Image (cartoon, helix red, strand yellow):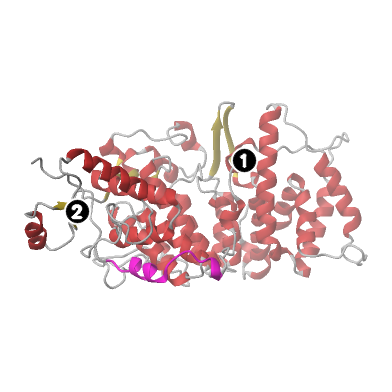
């Protein structure tokens, strides 16, 4: 459902059908029964504004005018120089106070308090995302997915109608704004849970949507695995998507620090260099009429180029597939080939244009990307016909790696890859690490109550009481000390719940020994 809502259906003709006119289309699926619409910005919730109204400046590198001419078809790249295509979420003052309370509960590490907080405040997407991750770790996948869907639904209800993937003009979001960070994290978690459940086409569609909001900086690192999702679907359209993304040159890798600004291409990343060759190989071999495909390179040429730049990956793929190097097959004899590839890898030296710090940081990021690629995509390279093709390309790469004068061709890792050196590989794991059943810290009853959207029920988590766990004991003592300072005859003997019926609160407040929670008593 999410994939179809994001990009429509792919009929035989290859065109995409969008939503029907006059029909409300929820990108991440319709709301569940019982979900009421969350409050908007004016009502104490979340809103959205475009940069032309907010008078915000477009972030780097989109503010640079020269990147508009990087490709022949510059229409897509002109979208991001218009301030009206940039958006940002806005927090109301009421929501900011609620978010502060969530951060205090988050620091305690008490998941039961988090569940009670969500039961009291059902429209805080940051809290819903946190509890969703906990639910997946205790093997409550349905509950975790329901919390994740509600978080996405809140963001969708808070967005403007113009902020939609169905528009012909792309909408952009800056992750460096605190208000926008939550949507990126929620979409990244949706990609992860889709991968765990085997919904690769959904993972690919959400990845495309995630990348479209900030394609040049890729703040979530989704380009590290997006090629894997495209190949995992075993779909012709998705293979073609991978090929077009590389050959169109519309997506570059931008990175800057105190040492300078760096720009790279998709094929500067090891995973995209090899996956591009694999997509071409599948297209040439399995697609009818592929001989008429007007591509930039053939699959073998693309693979030779990838091996010349990243020769060490060939051996890593073979080892991950438990390839037997002891025998000497008649078709593929890998022993001498791997020795030559090791020599090619040792020829990679520091680029004289950059200092040692830039080189080692780029080398470290390149190794991290290669590790993630081999771990996730090694199964694509285990079939016999693919191994024969890989061997032939490796032999060709070795035979052409020297120039006529006998000097080795030296390839340097792109400095733009430094953008990914801080990525945690566990972010893209295909399996969720489960907690032991005896170590489950979450009360199932509280988890069920957090799934019910009922903002009118009595609060479960109160600063003035300790009915459950003492998760806010320090704040409670501080509040009581402040109340004690306002009083002459000692602190009140009874506190009134403000969530009680209005008449009950009014009558109880007339008694001198009662006190309304959160308000100091009058001076007597």
Residue plotted at (33% across, 48% down): 101
Q: Nearer the viewer, residue 295 or 385?
A: 385
Quote the CA–CA distance across marks 2 and 1: 63 Å
Under circle 2, the secondary element is loop
Q: Which numbered disc, 2 or 1, marks the residue that appears first in the sequence?
A: 1
Asked if the magenta segment contains residue 438, the reply would be yes
Specify whether residue 258 is painted magenta. no
Main secondary structure along the magenta-highlighted residues: helix
Circle 1 SS class? helix
**117 and 518: which is toward the camera:** 518
Q: Quadrant of the N terminus?
A: bottom left
Q: Residue lying at the far front in this picture: please name it.
A: 489
Task: Give the total of numbered labels.
Answer: 2
Query: Residue 326 appears at what percent x and percent y?
Result: 92, 64
Could you say where residue 355 lies in the image, as x and y percent from the top left? 69, 26
Residue 171 screen position, x and y as percent: 37, 48
Q: Which residues are magenta?
A: 437-453
**In-front residue for pair 9/478:** 478
Disc 1: CA contacts within 10 A as few (<14), some (14-19) or many (>=20): many
User: In this image, 128 relative to 484: left or right?
Assistant: right
Which quarter of the figure has residue 84?
Answer: top left
The image quadrant of residue 502 is: bottom left
Q: Is residue 321 left or right of residue 211?
A: right
- Percent x, y for residue 415? 63, 35
Name the residue tied to disc 1: 417
Return the residue at label 2: 493
Q: Is residue 294 left or right of residue 107?
A: right
């Amino acid at each position: 459902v999410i994939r179809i809502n994001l990009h429509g259906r792919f009929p035989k003709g290859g065109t995409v059908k969008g939503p029907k006119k006059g029909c409300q289309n929820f990108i991440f699926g319709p709301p569940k029964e019982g979900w009421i619409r969350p409050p908007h910005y004016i009502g104490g919730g979340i809103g959205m504004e475009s940069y032309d109204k907010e008078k915000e400046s477009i972030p780097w590198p989109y503010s640079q005018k020269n990147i508009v001419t990087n490709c022949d078809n510059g229409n897509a790249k002109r979208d991001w120089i218009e301030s009206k295509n940039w958006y940002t979420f806005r927090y109301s003052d009421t929501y900011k106070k609620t978010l502060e309370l969530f951060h205090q509960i988050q620091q305690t590490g008490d998941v039961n308090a988090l569940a009670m907080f969500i039961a009291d405040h059902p429209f805080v997407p940051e809290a819903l995302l946190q509890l969703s991750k906990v639910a997946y770790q205790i093997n409550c996948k349905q509950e975790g997915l329901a919390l994740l869907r509600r978080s996405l639904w809140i963001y969708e209800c808070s967005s403007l109608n113009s902020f939609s993937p169905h528009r012909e003009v792309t909408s952009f979001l800056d992750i460096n704004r605190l208000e926008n960070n939550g949507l990126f994290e929620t979409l990244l978690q949706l990609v992860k849970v889709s991968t765990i459940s085997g919904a690769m086409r959904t993972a690919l569609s959400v990845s495309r949507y995630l990348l479209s909001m900030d394609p040049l900086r890729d703040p979530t690192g989704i380009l590290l695995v997006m090629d894997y999702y495209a190949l995992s679907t075993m779909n012709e359209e998705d293979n073609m998507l991978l090929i077009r993304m590389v050959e169109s040159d519309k997506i570059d890798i931008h990175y800057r620090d105190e040492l300078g600004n760096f720009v790279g291409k998709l094929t500067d990343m090891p995973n995209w260099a090899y996956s591009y060759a694999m997509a071409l190989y599948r297209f040439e071999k399995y697609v009818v009429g592929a001989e008429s495909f007007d591509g930039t390179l053939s699959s073998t040429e693309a693979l030779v180029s990838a091996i010349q730049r990243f020769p060490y990956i060939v051996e890593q793929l073979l080892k991950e597939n438990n390839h037997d190097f002891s025998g000497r097959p008649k078709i593929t004899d890998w022993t001498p080939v791997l020795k030559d590839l090791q020599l090619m890898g040792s020829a990679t030296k520091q680029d004289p244009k950059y200092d040692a710090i830039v080189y080692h940081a780029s080398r470290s990021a390149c190794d991290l990307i290669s590790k993630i690629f081999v771990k996730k995509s090694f199964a694509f390279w285990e079939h016999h016909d693919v191994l024969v093709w890989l061997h032939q390309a490796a032999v060709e790469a070795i035979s052409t790696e020297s120039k006529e004068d006998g000097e080795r061709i030296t390839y340097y890792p792109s400095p733009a890859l430094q953008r990914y050196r801080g990525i945690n590989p566990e972010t893209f794991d295909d399996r969720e690490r489960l907690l032991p059943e005896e170590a489950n810290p979450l009360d199932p009853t509280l988890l069920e109550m957090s799934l019910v959207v009922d903002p009118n029920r009595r609060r479960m988590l109160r600063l003035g009481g300790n009915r459950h766990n003492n998760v806010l004991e320090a704040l409670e003592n501080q509040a009581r000390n402040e109340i004690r300072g306002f009083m002459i005859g000692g602190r009140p003997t009874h506190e009134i719940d403000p969530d009680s019926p209005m008449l009950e609160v009014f009558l109880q407040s007339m008694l001198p020994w009662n006190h309304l929670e959160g308000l100091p008593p009058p001076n007597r």
